[in-house]
């Protein structure tokens, strides 16, 4: 069974940093593209970032470019999102999401981790 | 890039059919047959319901179907059931600059 378990969320002050982790199991992590998608409280889904299977190709939404960094450790089956210079508008549930090779849809989602940016 | 446009809410009685629209532009929905749909129950993670406009993942009921015409994609739920009550989001690939756009979301209510 595919499992994606996020951790690392919490309360942080504006300008602060946080690193999210996503532990993957039940599939060959090293062969899949992985993404982060976020959802502000009561709002819709927003794509944040993606990484190819070996981490050599990464992409970001304009709203986080230069502040967030996606990375992965395939030996540990773990995806990361380093978030720096956090803003109040980054407050959201962050989902770790899998995309099959050659596909453009999100076939498995984690349960999400809440990041709250507030003073 | 703005989010794709969906109606805020759609409702129907049990057994009826409803359709949710998802309007984008010629840069996303109109160009790519890479529209997917997600169901999100309250407090839960989204679940893939339709991909590549009209394909259903294994395990998803055939009461769910998708289509596209021009810049607008649609999700139809036939034989509406009470457990179909949820928020539904469309998503389109939007090229190598914007990457992915989600819709604004539609709350489906079963009367």
Image (spheres, rainbow, N blue to C red):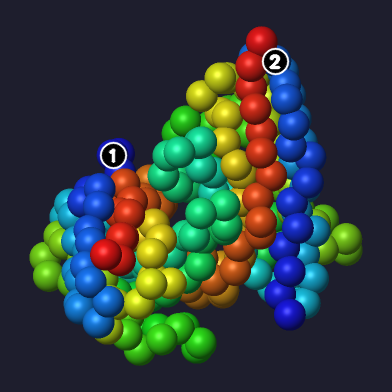
Position of B13 compared to A29: left or right?
A: left
Residue B34 lies, in percent from the top left, at 34, 69
| Residue lying at 36% horizontally and 60% vertically, measured from the top left | B88
In the image, B4 versus B28, the foreground residue is B4
Of all residues, the one furthest to the left in this rendering is B70
Give the labeled residue for mark 1: B2
The mark found on residue A13 in the picture is 2
| Residue lying at 25% horizontally and 48% vertically, measured from the top left | B8
Q: How crowded is mark 2: few (under 14 residues within 10 Å), some or many (20 or more)?
A: some
The mark found on residue B12 in the picture is none
Q: Given this view, does label 2 or label 1 mark the residue nearer the observer?
A: 2
- Is residue B28 shown to the viewer in this render? yes
Tell me the SS state at disc 2: loop
User: Which picture quadrant has residue B89?
Assistant: bottom left
Residue A72 lies, in percent from the top left, at 76, 53
Above or below: residue B20 compared with residue A46: below
- Is residue B66 shown to the viewer in this render? no
Above or below: residue A38 compared with residue B59: above
């Amino acid at each position: 069974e595919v499992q994606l378990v996020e951790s690392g969320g919490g309360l942080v002050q504006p300008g602060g940093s946080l690193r999210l982790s996503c532990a993957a199991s039940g599939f060959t992590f090293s062969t899949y593209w992985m993404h982060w998608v976020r959802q502000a409280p009561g709002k819709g889904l927003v794509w944040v970032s993606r990484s190819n299977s070996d981490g050599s190709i990464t992409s970001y939404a304009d709203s986080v470019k230069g502040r967030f960094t996606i990375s992965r450790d395939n030996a540990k089956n773990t995806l990361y999102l380093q978030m720096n210079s956090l803003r109040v508008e980054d407050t959201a549930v962050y989902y770790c999401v899998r995309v099959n090779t050659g596909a453009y849809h999100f076939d498995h989602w984690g349960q999400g981790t809440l990041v709250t940016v507030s003073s | 890039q703005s989010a794709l446009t969906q109606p805020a809410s759609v409702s129907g009685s049990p057994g009826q059919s409803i359709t949710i629209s998802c309007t984008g532009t010629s840069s996303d929905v109109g160009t790519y047959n890479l529209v997917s749909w997600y169901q999100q129950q309250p407090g839960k993670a989204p679940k893939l319901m339709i991909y590549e406009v009209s394909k259903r993942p294994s395990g998803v009921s055939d009461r769910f179907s998708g289509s596209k015409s021009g810049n607008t994609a649609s999700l139809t739920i036939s034989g509406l059931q009470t457990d179909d009550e949820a928020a539904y989001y469309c998503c389109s690939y939007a090229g190598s600059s914007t990457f992915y756009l989600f819709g604004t979301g539609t709350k489906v209510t079963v009367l």
